[in-house]
Amino acid sequence: MALNDIVGFIFSPLTENLNPSLTVIIISLIVSFIVTLIYKLFTNQSQLKQNKEEIEYLRSEIKKNKNNQEKMMELNQELLKKSTGQFKHTYKATLITFVPIILILGWMQKMFAPM
């Protein structure tokens, strides 16, 4: 398969010269760094932080209003809107990183699985 050959070529310096366990650790660190970088570049960090703070505030308000069902329902609906917004902000980065990670994991399985 051509994609496995491409991934294999990219990581060939590691697979040819290092212990397999060390190779897996290094590839994992590289992939983690790239995924983190993509999330930072493709998400609005200030918006995510603001949404997170609002979600935490709404959760605390829900706890305070346990006895008031009507207020609790209203706060839960607002919490759902904020959580959905949070998901929409990170969805693009997830889609960008998903396919390469699946390819790398498939290649690693073929490369390092016991025979």
Image (cartoon, rainbow, N blue to C red):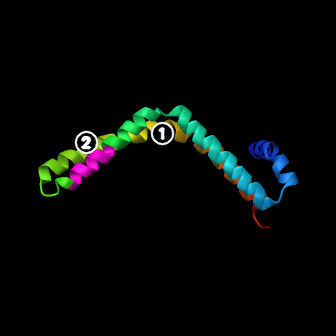
Examine the image and state in which quarter residue 87 appears.
top left
In this view, the residue farthest toward the bottom is 115
Camera-side residue of 27 and 53 = 53
Q: Is residue 85 visible?
A: no
Q: Secondary structure at mark 2?
A: helix
Mark nearer the viewer, 1 or 2: 2
Q: Secondary structure at mark 1?
A: helix
Q: Which mark is residue 61?
A: none
Circle 1 residue:
91
C-alpha gap between disc 1 and disc 2: 20 Å
Q: Position of residue 37 (x, y in %)?
A: 60, 38
- Above or below, comparing residue 14 to residue 45 in the picture: below
Camera-side residue of 50 and 79 = 50
Give the residue displayed 60% in from the left and 42% down from the top.
Answer: 35
Residue type for callout 1: Tyr
- Above or below, comparing residue 17 to residue 77 in the picture: below
Going from N to C along the chain, the mark reached first, 1 or 2, is 2
Q: Is residue 76 visible?
A: yes
Q: Position of residue 13 (x, y in %)?
A: 84, 47
Give the residue displayed 22% in from the left and 52% down from the top.
Answer: 62
Callout 1 crowding tier (Cα within 10 Å): few <14, some 14–19, many ≥20: some
In this view, the residue farthest toward the right is 17
Asked if the magenta segment contains residue 21, the reply would be: no
Residue type for callout 2: Glu
Examine the image and state in which quarter residue 57 appears.
top left
Circle 2 residue:
78
Q: Position of residue 74 (x, y in %)?
A: 18, 45
| Main secondary structure found in the magenta portion | helix
- Residue numbers of the magenta segment: 55-63
